[in-house]
Each structure stands twice: as structure tokens, then as C-alpha cells.
Image: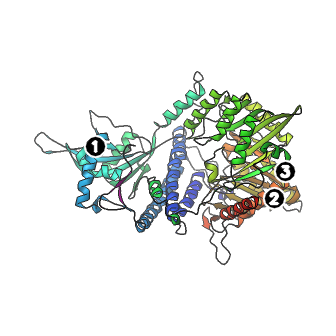
Amino acid sequence: MENLCFENRELSWLRFNERVLEEAEDERLPLCERLSFLSIFQSNLDEFFMVRIGSLHDQMLLDSESRDNKTRMTPGEQIDAAAGRVRELSKRRSKAYRALIQKLMEQGITLLDFSEVGDKSEKYLRSLFKEDFMPLLSAFVVGKKQSFPFLHNKEIYAVASLSSKSAKGEKSEKTKIGIVPCGSTVFPRLIPVPDRTGCYILAEELILHYLPLVFSGYKVKLSALARITRNADIDADSIYDEDLNYREHMEEVVKLRKKLCPVRIEIKGDIEQDIIKKICEQINLDSRMVFIYDTPLDVSFFSGICDDLRSRSELFYAPRRPQKSPDFDESRSILDQIEEGDKMLHYPYQNIRPFLMMLSEAANDPSVISIKMTLYRLASDSKVVESLAEAAENGKQVDVLVELKARFDEENNIEWSRRLEQAGCHVIYGLDGLKVHSKLCLILRRKNDEIKYITQVGTGNYNEKTSRFYTDLSVMTADPDIGHEASAIFQALTLGETVDHVQKMLVAPHCLQNKLIDLIDREISKQNNGQNGHIRLKLNSLTDKDLMLKLIEASRAGVKIEMVVRGICCLRAGVEGFTDNVSVISIVGRYLEHSRIYIFGDGDEADYYISSADWMTRNTLRRVEVALPVYAEPLKKRLEYIFSLLQSDNVQARDMQPDGNYVRRYPKNEKALSCQDLLYDEAYRLASEIN
């Protein structure tokens, strides 16, 4: 019966992306923000196929009868169920697209089909195509002398069924496939249509229309646009060659990923099923993974339209900028202030600047002898790297673990690792079989012949860009016990190992899941002894079956469990007899809810943690993760306040139902309450009081 409490991971993720799509459909939102959400929906779905469906595809090849440990579905069953759900969502996506295009027309911007282009404009576009496009296009006719071309991941191709001509001019019955890549970076995606202000045609539609000019020796019978998605789920460690430099190995992994097998093809246009079948055979793709659309295959061009509309402020969210934190006096030493008392920053409401100032100060402070840091994803112009490099150049010991296996950020991290090494930093590249996902920084100072520790733990990456639109927490403490544990973590990482004992912090892979189970057991014991057990969690994802079984046990004992889970949640709330005391809400809004908060208990006996770790097996058992206990009373109260606001949201929050569906909250008789708006309002108010 416990299986009734579980949701399949892939289907739960698709429910999350449905919530993103809801934002694109929401007429309360400004138009350009809705366009952005539709683009996010698409990019999310691309990554879902590249990573999750790619992984299931690999599992199916290795063991087609293996089963998901929660819902007992085989890889093939999961792929089929996910594909069916994607088709349902695709219909909504197309409907949302058409509604947004209609709204754009009201703003004077129109995307035209060729049927809507007049003779004068057509003459201009034909000339434009001949002069500017045709010289840059590569055309392939698949046949005995021309093998099927390699189709690049996420690129759009014009595909035509061609009938050749005999020497006498008679049409041959044999159909060939013509393929033209449409992804050149030389010409723009949006082509202005002359004499029609605000009218555009997509570059791939232009190419598709003029395929007869490209294949002049053939008759184009039917044509369509196609877009391939390739598997990106590659295990970097399993193919590691110890004779290679690890950084060079990861560069090869990035190249290899681009060549992995296709897992999806999207089609827009009219072309024979036989041609689609032949393409699937050529790329070794199951016909179940063909998705047909009547709207553009890639809506990333929306960003260009939004740029053109930037002057119309009503089409965007009202501008919000990260504010000064009342916890810091930026005219004084940041390190000294942390020694005076624990500090916390809450992004994007508060500026990341005090943290960056801390690093810059540490790079130049004569009392600082070393800086140790884990890096996972960085901004393209990272000030964090600048400070670490400066510290090394100033003669300080700088140890940096750069996780080269941060998916889709490998190339960026490879370049930063080179820069750090060139500056004299000691760079470590991670551990065999384990990603280092923790957000941990340790600064050591020598003051009056005594070593002082400054430890920082964050819930999100050291990335100035994402700190403006991800909600994350960053805590800085001078607690010597925390400093000693952080030092032990770094010492283990330097040796290619992991810690197996800590007293205060929770550290995966050996000291996180088991300690969380102990904390849940404590709340169960309290409930069994006549006290009120209470667990509050804010996560991105919940999939760890051991932890979910323990939460079910706690719920059945009467422990109140409140969860805010933005994305995947494989535990269903409110299932009678099992999760009656569990509530789950998801908040999808302007800012991506990324922070992780764990609270066990109430009042003076409550334990508070912030962490980089979701409750997923990959985080709890297969990564190096850190959860920091929060001891300072002002910071505890702050976490209480943040969690209560999240629970009270009736604008962006959705309540999970016992069947796994979500119902969006809408303010009825009560006042509209958006936790993100309220937190920003408060940040502005507190900053004004500082000034």
C-alpha cells in the first residue's frame, strides 16, 4: 500500500514543467515574462530528454527489466509514460504560443507565414535568400553517393522529399531525402519583412520556403522542419583513461556528448510518414519518440523580441535590484564583522556584494594565510575567481576544488581551472565516482598567534549572475568547531577522500542521510511521548526512498510535516493512512526557489540547517554535500520567518493533492500574498533605513 504514496520521478518532473507552462499561460503576468516562461518550458524539456530520457534509454539497453524502486516501472514503461505526458503538454504549449503571438500582434509585432507575404515582399525575400542565405547553406541529398549527414543536437534542419529527373526530363518515382541545416550563426533568426513594420519571418521558414532554389535539380514534393535532441547522459568517470590529464579528459567528454544517440525528433510541416520513418532508421530512433508540432520548434527567438520591447516597461516585471543587507556595514572589515557574530545573506533580495567583499578582503589581508573553496558553477566573468587568483598571487595558500563534471558547465569550469592554476592556486578536480556539489568556503587567519576560522556555506552556486534571480541563502560564521569540521572536509578532499565523522555539520556521502533519519526519528519519539513532532523542509527535489519511507513513518506517528518542494516530489501528500500529516506546496514564480532549509522541531529545541543538498539519493549518497547548522538566534528567527511566508503564499503556490496533481492557490476573500514580493518589499525597506 505504501506504493500509493509514491510518484514516478520523471512524471513528477513533468508536473513541475507543467507549472512553468502555467506561468506562460497566466494572463496576470506581463507579456514578455510569459514569453520567457515559454522559452524556459522548452529549454527544461530539452534537458529532460537529453538527461532523463537519455538515462532511461541507457538503462533499457543495459537491463530492460530493471525497475524504478518507487513505482516499479521499467525504463521502457517510464519512457512511454513520459512521452505520452509530453504530447499532452505539447498541445498546451502550442495553444499558449498562439495566444502569446496574438498578444504580440497587439504590440505591433507579427510573425508571418509565407502565405501572408505579399508579392512585393516575396520578391525582396527571394533576392535576400539568393544573395545572403544560399552561399552559406550546405545541402545534402541522401543517396548511394551521399551518406546521411550528422544532425547536431537541438539544431533545426529543413527536410524535403525529392523526386529526381531523368535525362529526358521525366520524373523518377524514386524519392530521395534532402536535408539543409538552418542553424547558421551568420544570419539572424528573425528576418524583417519589408514594407510591413514590425513583421518578421523565421530564418528556418525562409529556408524551407525556398528549398526548390536549393534543390534546383529536383522537384520538392513535401518539406518540413526537424529538430533532433541527443542523449547527454554520459558518465565521465566510467570512461576515464588514467593516462590522460583529467581536464583534457573532460574536454573529450564534452566533445563526445555532442555525438551521442538521438532520443527525440520534433517535426513541423507536411512530409510523408515514410520519410520520417527513414530518418528514424538512419539515426536509430524509435518512432515513438517522434513529436509533431504546428508551431515553431524552438522559441528562443522570443529573447530577441523581448529586447526590442525593452522600452515598454509595462510588458515586464517591475525592476527589482538586490539591496544592501542590514547585517553588514560595508565601510568596515567584513571578516571582523563575521567574527563578531554569524551573518546571513538572502539572494536575490540582498546583494551578494558582502560575500564578494569578504573574498577580496581575504585576498589582500595580511592576517589571512589560506582560502579553501569548492566551485561548481560560476559566472562567465567571475569575481570569485578573480579574488582567488589575486590571493594566490599575493602568496596565500589557495586550495580550490573545481567540479569539472558540473553538467553543461564543463567547458566554463575547464577554462576557470586553467586561470586558477596559472595564478598559483592548488586546483583539485573532484573525486572518483562522486560529484562535489557542496558550496563551502573556509578562510584561515592568524591573529595574535591564534588561528581563526571563517566558514561560509551556501545553498547555491558562487555565481553573481544567478544570485540575481535564484533564491539562495549564504551563512558566514566564525564558530571554531564549524571551522575545524570544514578544515577536515577540505583535507579529505585534497587526499581524494571524504569525511566519515562530523559532530555539527551534515556531510554527504557518509554523514547526511543517516543523520537526517536520526533527526526524523527524534521527532517521531517526541510525538510518541506526547509532545508535538514537527518537520519543515524546503527543497528543490525529493526522491530519496529511504528518507521518504521515514517521513511516511513520521506522518503515521502523527508528526506534522510541512514541505515546500519546487520541482520533483516523489512523495504524495495527504494519502489516507500514510501521509495524512504531510503537506507539500510548490512555488514557481519570478525567482527560482533554490534554497534548501531543514527545520526539525519547534521553539528552543528546534534544529535549523541550510544546505546545498536536495533529498535525492544522488545528493545524499553519491555527492559531497554540506548542511550547516544555524545557531545564531537572529538567523533562526529569519529562517522561521522565510518559511512562514512561503507557507502563506497564495499567488505562486500550488498545493499537492493525494493523486500527485497540484492545485494553484488564488486569493479569494483574503489579501493576495506573494512571498517573493513581500521579501523584496522588506529588503527595500531595510535598505532605506540603512541609508
Callout 2, which amino acid? Lys
Q: Are there few (<14), some (14-19), or many (20+) residues within 10 Å of tag 1?
A: some
Q: Secondary structure at mark 3?
A: loop
- Which of the two residues, 109 or 102, is positioned nearer the viewer here? 109
Image height of 277 relative to 85, above or below? above
Residue at the image position 40 percent from the left and 63 percent from the top:
109
The secondary structure type at the circle numbered 1 is: helix
Q: Which residue is mark 2?
A: 637
Give me the C-alpha separation between circle 1 and circle 3: 66 Å
What kind of residue is marked 1?
A: Met
Q: Is residue 509 visible?
A: no
At horizontal 36% and vertical 54% (from top left) the residue drawn is 268
Q: Are marks 1 and 2 in contact (CB under 8 Å)?
A: no
Q: Main secondary structure of the magenta part?
A: loop
Q: Quadrant of residue 415?
A: top right
Residue 438: image tag: none
Q: Is residue 185 magenta?
A: yes
Is 128 on the left-hand or right-hand side of 576? left
What span is in magenta?
183-201
Residue matched to label 3: 631
Q: Position of residue 208 (x, y in %)?
A: 30, 50
